[in-house]
């Protein structure tokens, strides 16, 4: 059981594991913690701040973990696509494949004391924060064992014990919430920051500017992360924004433009931002990223962009392929071993789906639970307090 | 829930307290509540426009910034949507903000945050987060403040699941409801009224809270149940004087809890009188009265001897001219006429 011993050792060493599923590593894959320096793919662009260095410190173990974590996320999203087409997932389903580097890189730069809040493309952020993959599938299918008990759905994943605040359907509404989280950090004098994520579409919401103003005014430890995947649903950024340089939108708030498909660049930027924010107040990180799927499963994603564009990005900038190349170049593993890892991940995702399918639908009584916190024995819903007629003694 | 409503009978005895009690104005009662709760619990904080250095546009937060500091009594920019959202986020993370809308009407800008985030996050997160937020501010028709500053938002917020709503009307219940709202783990909207801030009353020296879900028996009676809240309570009591002179015995209940209704108190009253008049400042369409009427019909139909009457404000923007503004809201003479009609 050498592999199991390796696994346990690995589990103990890494402060946080993205995926709770244990993974049997192939014998030859390096899990060394020897430092390794990699240069980011492109230089950072900055606004009223000096950018961090392009040389990123990492380790073989970390690179392998990145590969694995992103592969799990990729598999998860592709599986969700199939489940949606099989009508097991209904409603809106916004997939994150292509953007995995942002979630994984950010997680590598933070601790669980830091808070993360995002919008509705939240499956992978939930997984990055240590979310349970079975609970995630169960939630997507509306089952009892879902992470929100089947009552939230795709757009409402949360994990309170990991300081992950969701999971929000209305574009941009989470930005002020993120300021509130940062406010609480400051109020309690915690040495922690909030990563407040939003998209290029949400960047045009008034509340984003309101949030920026308040965060800067009170020096809140808020990092506003614009996941710029260049399309607000079907509208390209240049058709919606007079200035698509979202990292400059802060005006008096510094900003950094990051290659969001390069997990190491993301990690470096988030680390830099965290340090900056704790001392100086808010900063904007614009992650230049891309989603392969359409805006949601109801959007084919090809009416407003060409298939060549999508294929081109997949060919040249795919985050997982980039890390695979790094691993192979530095001889940390063989190509076959990585393929085996992917196969195993695929199997485990399938197992998770099977397990999630076993979870039953929520009990009808769940309709009325969690409307209120059960204060004063309050179980009321509408104005007349009960769902049945009141009976007087 | 049944046993608790019996306490409503004791609400009349607000004036009976152990020690001397002290007299104050309604806005001072709200302030006293805030000070007591902020002293007792360091997570209670206040957000709003001009609440800090200015002391609050209606002086509810006067002196609090000096006592508790600028971070706990936060002067926000004029950005209702965001600072309400910030309150929700802070509440998710364990603080207990009290968000003030300088005028309730301004909170329409924060409707998305109040409805989708404040009201629903406890549910959509499967119970993980609680939002112990208090949203308060003055609303109602004032003295010629114009249409946009004379709004009644009770009806707009009514159907948001997950919210509780209360309306205060006296210094005693203002302090009690504010304290209860702050302590509640659920989001509570506390409706104050622009014209009631200078009401004077003697309240107990010792600490007390009012139950959020209870109605207040203002005047027990036999002939008709008059259900009202906020400023209209005073129009009803004025009408009651006339009615008593004319030989009627109205029972006046200040419902206080707008969501949920205290159907126990209300039901017991209807059981006794068999006649109901609702007097509210809300618009006729989709107002509190409309829901209350429905709830009474669904629950207490068998006890009714006459159709339920509901007097509400007219479905018009509140005009500026004084006589027109007076005609928008319910006046005591109309209340008297309505009771006479019901009791025929």
Image (cartoon, rainbow, N blue to C red):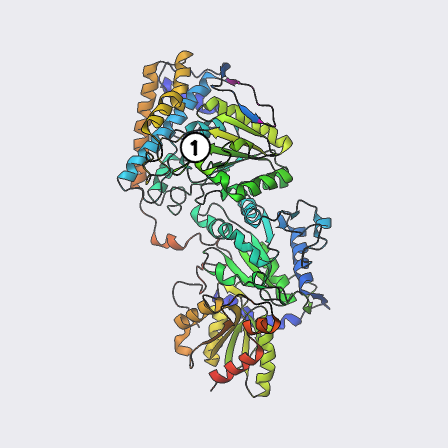
Q: Is A359 left, or right, of A288 in this rendering?
A: left
Residue B300: image location, x then y, percent: 41, 74
Residue at 39% x, 77% y: name it: B302
Residue B211 visible within the image: no
Query: Circle 1 sits in a helix, a strand or a loop, which is it?
Result: loop
Look at the image and give the residue range highlighted in magenta. Answer: A47-57
Residue, disc 1: A230
Does residue B109 sit above or below A172 in this rendering?
Answer: below
The stretch drawn in magenta includes residue A299: no
Name the image quarter holding the N terminus of chain A.
Answer: top left
Q: Is A41 left, or right, of A72 in this rendering?
A: right
Nearest the eye: B147 or A375:
B147
Residue at 44% x, 21% y: name it: A10
Does residue A341 sit above or below B41 in this rendering?
Answer: above
Using the rendered view, name the quadrant where residue A128 is placed: top left
Residue at 57% x, 22% y: name it: A52
Residue B268: image location, x then y, percent: 48, 75
Q: Is A196 left, or right, of B234 in this rendering?
A: left
Residue A208: image location, x then y, percent: 53, 41
């Amino acid at each position: 059981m050498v592999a199991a011993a390796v696994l346990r050792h690995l589990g103990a060493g890494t402060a946080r594991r993205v995926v709770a599923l244990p993974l049997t590593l192939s014998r030859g894959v390096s899990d060394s913690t020897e430092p390794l320096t990699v240069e980011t793919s492109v230089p950072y662009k900055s606004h009223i701040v000096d950018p961090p260095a392009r040389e990123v410190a990492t380790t073989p173990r970390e690179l392998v973990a990145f590969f694995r974590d992103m592969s799990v996320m990729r598999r998860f999203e592709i599986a969700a696509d199939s489940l949606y087409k099989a009508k097991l997932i209904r409603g809106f389903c916004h997939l994150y494949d292509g953007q995995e580097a942002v979630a994984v890189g950010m997680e590598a730069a933070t601790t669980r004391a830091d808070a993360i809040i995002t919008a509705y493309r939240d499956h992978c952020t939930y997984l990055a924060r240590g979310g349970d993959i079975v609970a995630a599938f169960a939630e997507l299918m509306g089952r009892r064992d879902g992470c929100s008990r089947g009552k939230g759905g795709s757009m409402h994943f949360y994990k309170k014990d990991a300081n992950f605040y969701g999971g929000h359907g209305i574009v941009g509404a989470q930005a002020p919430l993120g300021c509130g989280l940062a406010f609480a950090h400051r109020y309690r004098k915690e040495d922690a920051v909030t990563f407040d994520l939003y998209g290029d579409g949400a960047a045009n919401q008034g509340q984003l500017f309101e949030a920026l103003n308040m965060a800067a005014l009170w020096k809140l430890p808020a990092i506003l992360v614009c996941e710029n995947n260049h399309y607000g649903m079907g509208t390209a950024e240049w058709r919606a924004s007079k200035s698509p340089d979202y990292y400059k939108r802060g005006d008096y708030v510094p900003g950094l433009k990051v290659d969001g498909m390069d997990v190491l660049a993301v990690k470096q930027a988030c680390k830099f931002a965290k340090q900056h924010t704790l001392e100086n107040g808010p900063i904007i990180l614009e992650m230049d990223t891309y989603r392969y799927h359409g805006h949601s499963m109801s959007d084919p994603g090809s009416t407003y962009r060409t298939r060549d564009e999508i294929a081109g990005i997949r060919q040249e900038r795919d985050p997982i392929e980039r890390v695979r190349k790094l691993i192979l170049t530095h001889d940390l593993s063989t190509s076959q071993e990585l393929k085996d890892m992917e196969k195993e991940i695929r199997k485990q995702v399938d197992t998770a789906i099977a397990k999630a399918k076993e979870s039953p639908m929520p009990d009808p009584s769940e309709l009325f639970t969690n409307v209120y916190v059960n204060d004063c024995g309050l179980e009321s819903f509408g104005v007349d307090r009960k769902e049945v007629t009141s009976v007087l003694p | 829930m049944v046993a608790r409503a019996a306490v409503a009978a004791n609400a009349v005895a607000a004036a009976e307290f152990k020690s001397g009690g002290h007299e104050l104005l309604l806005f001072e009662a709200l302030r006293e509540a805030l000070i007591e709760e902020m002293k007792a619990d360091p997570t209670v904080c206040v957000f709003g426009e001009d609440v800090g250095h200015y002391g609050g546009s209606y002086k509810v937060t006067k002196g609090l910034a000096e006592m508790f500091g600028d971070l706990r009594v936060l002067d926000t920019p004029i950005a209702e949507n965001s600072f309400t959202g910030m309150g929700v986020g802070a509440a998710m993370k364990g603080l207990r903000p009290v968000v003030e809308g300088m005028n309730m009407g301004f909170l329409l800008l924060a409707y998305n945050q109040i409805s989708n985030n404040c009201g629903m996050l406890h549910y959509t997160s499967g119970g993980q987060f609680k939002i112990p937020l208090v949203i308060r501010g003055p609303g109602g028709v004032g003295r010629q403040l114009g249409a946009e500053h004379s709004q009644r938002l009770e009806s707009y917020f009514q159907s948001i699941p997950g919210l509780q709503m209360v309306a205060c009307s006296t210094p005693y219940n203002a302090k009690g409801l504010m304290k209860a709202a702050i302590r509640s783990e659920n989001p509570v909207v506390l409706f104050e009224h622009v014209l009631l801030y200078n009401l004077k009353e003697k309240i107990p020296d010792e600490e007390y809270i009012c139950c959020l879900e209870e109605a207040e028996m203002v005047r027990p009676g036999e002939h008709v149940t008059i259900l009202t809240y906020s400023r209209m309570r005073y129009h009803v009591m004025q009408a009651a004087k006339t009615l008593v002179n004319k030989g009627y015995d109205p029972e006046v209940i200040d419902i206080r809890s707008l969501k949920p209704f205290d159907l126990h108190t209300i039901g017991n009253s209807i059981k006794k009188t068999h006649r109901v008049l609702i007097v509210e400042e809300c618009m006729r369409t989709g107002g509190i009265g409309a829901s209350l009427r429905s709830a009474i019909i669904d629950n207490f139909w068998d006890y009714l001897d006459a159709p339920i009457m509901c007097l509400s404000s007219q479905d018009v923007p509140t005009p500026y001219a004084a006589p027109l503004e007076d005609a928008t809201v319910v006046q005591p003479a109309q209340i008297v006429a309505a009771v006479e009609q019901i009791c025929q």
